[in-house]
Image (cartoon, rainbow, N blue to C red):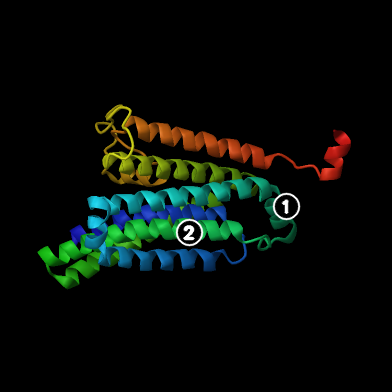
Amino acid sequence: MLVSLIIVFRELMEAGLIVGIVLAATEGVAGRGRWVAGGVAGGAAGACAVAAFAAALSNAFDGIGQELFTAGILLFAVVMLGWHIVWMSRHSREMAAELKKAGHAVRMGERTLAALAVVVAVAVLREGAELVLFMFGIAANAGGAADMMAGSVAGMVLAVALSFVVYRGLVAIPLRRLFSVTNVLIALLAAGMAGQAAAVLHGVDLLPGWGEQLWDTTWLLDEKSLLGRSLHALVGYAARPSGIQMVVWLATLVALWGLSRAASRPHMPRRAAAAAG
């Protein structure tokens, strides 16, 4: 029971933290529940499919199919997060003004919701596939279906509770700062995913290392601890990062910051711009 509780809590906690940030980033947006729920359902279905075909996936592309798949979905999530940051940087003032004026859901385009639904699906798929494989292993080696089910339910309840606390904490931030805070968190999340993708590709010798281990902070914060895994999921924390991992992490963060700054500048109409010129 304890083993299944820990595993379920650990895996769902990582996906749940991302869902909490997404819910806070779309606070007040009409239809967000439908998009997020769709992302969770799609990710869960994908996790079951990945787990079912894990053996075939692992043997694909000369034995590195699973690594390529993992890196691919991480990079796709980075693109979706970047899209959301640019969209929010351009429309956050309008969204905040509309929320204050109307006091109800923001009635903007749903492109940002589609992008974040994909990110939710990726997070649930990645953690869910690991969870399914772990639970199959526990069931095969241990047995005790009742104890395993009780531990799984307890772990799920704890993970949902932690995700809710994160969500409520973010929503408590004043509206004028909520979009800025969630944009920063999403940028860190995207940089972490990009760094993890680089680490995965380096692990199968598709990217150079540029230093196998820049430092080791395991003594300070073990990557396998609860806090370490939380930071790993949210910002890509690694106790022993490679050079390529840090370069990609920093490059992604700088690129997203630049795109956000460019998108947040007021855009003059063409006629006004021509007259000014």
Rendered location of residue 116, percent (x, y)? 52, 56
Q: Is residue 187 left or right of residue 48?
A: right
The residue tagged 2 is 118
Q: Tell me the quadrant of the picture where the C terminus can be found.
A: top right
Q: Name the quadrant containing residue 146.
A: bottom left
Mark 2 residue type: Val
Mark 1, secondary structure of its residue? helix
What residue sits 33% from the left and 50% below the top? 68
Mark 2, secondary structure of its residue? helix
Q: Nearer the viewer, residue 118 or 175?
A: 118
> Going from the N terminus, do you reach mark 1 or mark 2 first?
1
Rendered location of residue 17, percent (x, y)? 42, 52
Rendered location of residue 167, percent (x, y)? 49, 54
From where the camera sits, is residue 173 visible? Answer: no
Rendered location of residue 193, percent (x, y)? 41, 45
What residue sits 17% from the left and 62% below the top? 137
Q: Nearer the viewer, residue 26 or 55?
A: 55
Mark 1 residue type: Ala
Residue 217's place in the image compared with 201, above or below, is above
The residue tagged 1 is 97
